[in-house]
Amino acid sequence: MENRKRILVVDDEKGLAKIIRLNLEQDGFEVVEAYNGTQAMEKLRITLPDLVLLDVMMPDMDGFTVLKMIREIGNTPVIMLTAKGEENDKVKGLELGADDYVTKPFSPRELTSRIKAVLRRGDFSRDEETGKIVVDDRLTIDFDRHEVWVEGELVQLRPTEYRLLYHLVQNAGWVLTHDQILNKVWGYEYENEPHYVRLYINYLRKKLEVDPANPKYILTERGVGYRFVDYKREKI
């Protein structure tokens, strides 16, 4: 019981929130409910959930506003729930810091699968190669501490961004295809969602590159995928 993951469900449709809670509890999760943005922020602070399911359309403040507030205080994984299913809404949520989205109506199995995939990315494995890597005078990556330093400043990466960087760096000099990146970083559940790769590559470039439009670390191999620049492999 102590190891159960806690999910905060935020939806103004109380009936739907309760259905989600019942299904998630059957799958072994602990669930907390909130029915508007104000309640969501209060319960986020009190209950410290492992993940937030956040409806986009709510009366007092929409899900995008709540998402911005969540991102101002931390990196708790967030999955957006949207009834529209429009690409613009999905991209907007991801750009604001959402980790995933699920379009209503959805099946309990689909929702659980997405939740587990996002949590899996957060529980990053340290079993592979670790250590501090100095890429050049600007960029240092410490895999043991999960820290990235650019020009002496600590850069905050969300779990998915860090996981993506990890796999790129561990395969430095080699091209990873879109499918390989999706499988390694997001999991098989995302095989038909290649836009995730493009978005998160852009996020990393904005945080790491001097000029994101002309990257020197994360290089595009057109029509194939991406590769991290090869570097002198001296770990500290």
Image: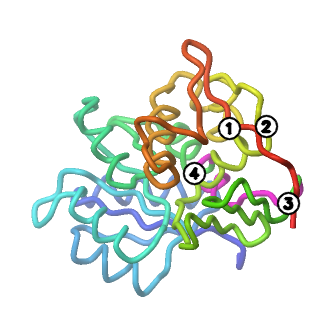
First-in-chain label (1 vs 4): 4
First-in-chain label (2 vs 4): 4
- Structural distance between the alpha carbons of marks 1 and 4: 17 Å
* Disc 4 residue type (three-letter): Thr
Of the two numbered discs 3 and 4 in the rendering, the one whose residue sits closer to the viewer: 3
Magenta range is: 117-128
Quick one: label 4, few (<14), some, or many (20+) residues within 10 Å? some
Task: Give the x, y percent position of residue 104.
Answer: 32, 37
Q: Residue at x 56, y 46 (%)?
A: 112
Of the two numbered discs 2 and 4 in the rendering, the one whose residue sits closer to the viewer: 2
Res. 66 image quadrant: bottom left
Q: Quadrant of the C terminus?
A: bottom right
First-in-chain label (2 vs 3): 3
Q: Is residue 172 above or below residue 61?
A: above
Q: Residue at x 70, y 61 (%)?
A: 141
Please name the residue that numbered disc 4 is placed on: 160
- Taking the magenta stretch, the answer to whether it contains residue 53 is no
Task: Give the x, y percent position of residue 17.
Answer: 34, 58
Q: Secondary structure at mark 4?
A: helix
Report whether 189 appears left or right of 145. left
First-in-chain label (2 vs 1): 2
- Structural distance between the alpha carbons of marks 2 and 1: 7 Å
Task: Give the x, y percent position of residue 192.
Answer: 53, 21
Q: Residue at x 24, y 56 (%)?
A: 64
Q: Residue furthest top?
A: 223
| Badge number at residue 171 | 2
Please name the residue that numbered disc 3 is placed on: 130
Quick one: label 2, few (<14), some, or many (20+) residues within 10 Å? some
* Disc 1 residue type (three-letter): Phe
